[in-house]
Image (spheres, grey):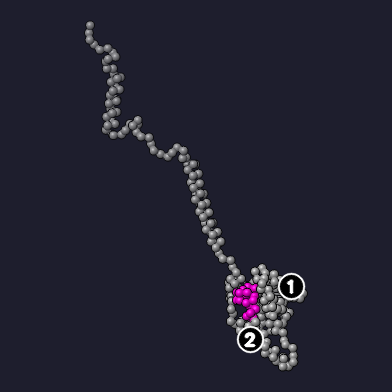
């Protein structure tokens, strides 16, 4: 019996071709140095969940959050700045319109007041020598004076009401916390104007219940200063506070100098 190989143990043509092909592939991989697909790492790219639409939504959201936060901060800063701005006073308003300080010392007006007092005293002496009654230093005008850009104004129908003006003055005085100063204010403005909003000094031209000189200084309290007793009283109280501290301080000065 011979010792030849069986068909399964022999080298078939197909097996030879596969082996040859495998050897050639191995040589190509060794030559090029490139890894096979099984050895190659997975590709790195954008996450599958970050689609173009989702990316756009995220971008818009970021803009809204940043922009909204910036607007909120800006608004807060603006509000804080506005809250610290001082409130304008009558003094500030008068200065803004070039009227100077309506409550501070005015050497020119003070000199006119002093001259008016001296003129009144001289007239009283002359009238006394002649046996005539003294002249009232206050006259009640038929038309409100102008000045400071204001034209003369007609008074509303009816006569003045000094009694009503007194009551209003007392109420406004108490609103300022000066209830204990009423006696001084009542005497001061009775002497100056008789509490008549149409009163004018014959010598100096001072006008109104508080006898403002010139009269248009009272415009810092209201454009109706020519005819409105409340506006005149408001200005007069502010003037007294600014120059003398209180009605009794103003009355003491008037008693000493003849004017305030």
Q: The residue tagged with tag 1: helix, strand or loop?
A: helix
Q: Residue at x 50, y 46 (%)?
A: 61
Q: Can I make out residue 153 in this image?
A: no
Of callouts 1 and 2, which one flags the residue occurring earlier in the amino acid sequence? 2
Q: Residue at x 63, y 73 (%)?
A: 238
The quarter of the picture where residue 97 lies is: bottom right
First to last magenta residue range:
237-254
Q: Residue at x 58, y 71 (%)?
A: 92
Q: Quadrant of the C terminus?
A: bottom right
Q: For this view, does 102 lie left or right of residue 1?
A: right
The residue where tag 1 is placed is: 164
Q: For this view, does 121 lie left or right of residue 65?
A: right
Q: Residue furthest top?
A: 1
Q: Examine the rendered structure and indicate whether residue 40 appears above or below residue 137.
A: above
Instruction: Give the mark count.
Output: 2
Q: Examine the rendered structure and indicate whether residue 32 appears above or below residue 120.
A: above
Please name whichever residue, 144 or 140, is drawn nearer the observer in this view of the structure: 140
Q: Is residue 43 magenta?
A: no
Q: Quadrant of the N terminus?
A: top left
Q: For this view, does 223 lie left or right of residue 4?
A: right
Q: The residue tagged with tag 2: helix, strand or loop?
A: helix
Q: Residue furthest bottom?
A: 129
Q: Can I make out residue 251 in this image?
A: yes
Please name whichever residue, 169 or 106, is drawn nearer the observer in this view of the structure: 169
Neighbor class of circle 1 (other Cα within 10 Å; few <14, some 14-19, many 20+) is: few
Q: Position of residue 164 (x, y in %)?
A: 74, 72
The residue where tag 2 is placed is: 115
Please name whichever residue, 64 or 171, is drawn nearer the observer in this view of the structure: 171
Please name whichever residue, 154 or 158, is drawn nearer the observer in this view of the structure: 158
Q: Position of residue 28 (x, y in %)?
A: 28, 31
């Amino acid at each position: 019996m011979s010792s030849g190989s069986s068909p399964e143990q022999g080298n078939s043509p197909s097996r030879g071709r596969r082996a040859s092909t495998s050897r050639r592939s191995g040589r190509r991989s060794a030559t090029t140095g490139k890894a096979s697909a099984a050895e190659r790492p997975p590709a790195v790219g954008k996450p599958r969940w970050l689609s173009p639409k989702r990316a756009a939504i995220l971008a818009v959201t970021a803009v809204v959050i940043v922009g909204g936060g910036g607007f909120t901060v800006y608004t807060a800063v603006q509000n804080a700045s506005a809250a610290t701005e001082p409130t304008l006073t009558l003094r500030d308003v008068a200065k803004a319109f070039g009227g100077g300080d309506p409550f501070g010392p005015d050497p020119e007006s003070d000199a006119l007041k002093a001259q008016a007092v001296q003129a009144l005293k001289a007239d009283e002496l002359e009238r006394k020598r002649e046996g005539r009654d003294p002249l009232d230093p206050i006259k009640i005008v038929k038309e409100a004076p102008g000045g400071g850009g204001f034209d003369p104004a007609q008074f509303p129908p009816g006569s003045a009401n000094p009694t009503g003006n007194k009551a209003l003055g007392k109420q406004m005085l108490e609103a300022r916390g000066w209830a204990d100063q009423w006696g001084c204010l009542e005497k001061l403005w009775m002497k100056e104007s008789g509490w008549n909003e149409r009163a004018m000094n014959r010598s100096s031209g001072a006008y109104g219940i508080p006898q403002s000189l010139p009269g248009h200084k009272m415009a810092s309290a209201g454009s109706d200063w020519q005819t409105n007793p409340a506006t005149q009283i408001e200005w007069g109280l502010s003037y007294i506070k600014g120059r003398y501290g209180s009605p009794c301080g103003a009355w003491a000065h008037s008693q000493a100098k003849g004017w305030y």
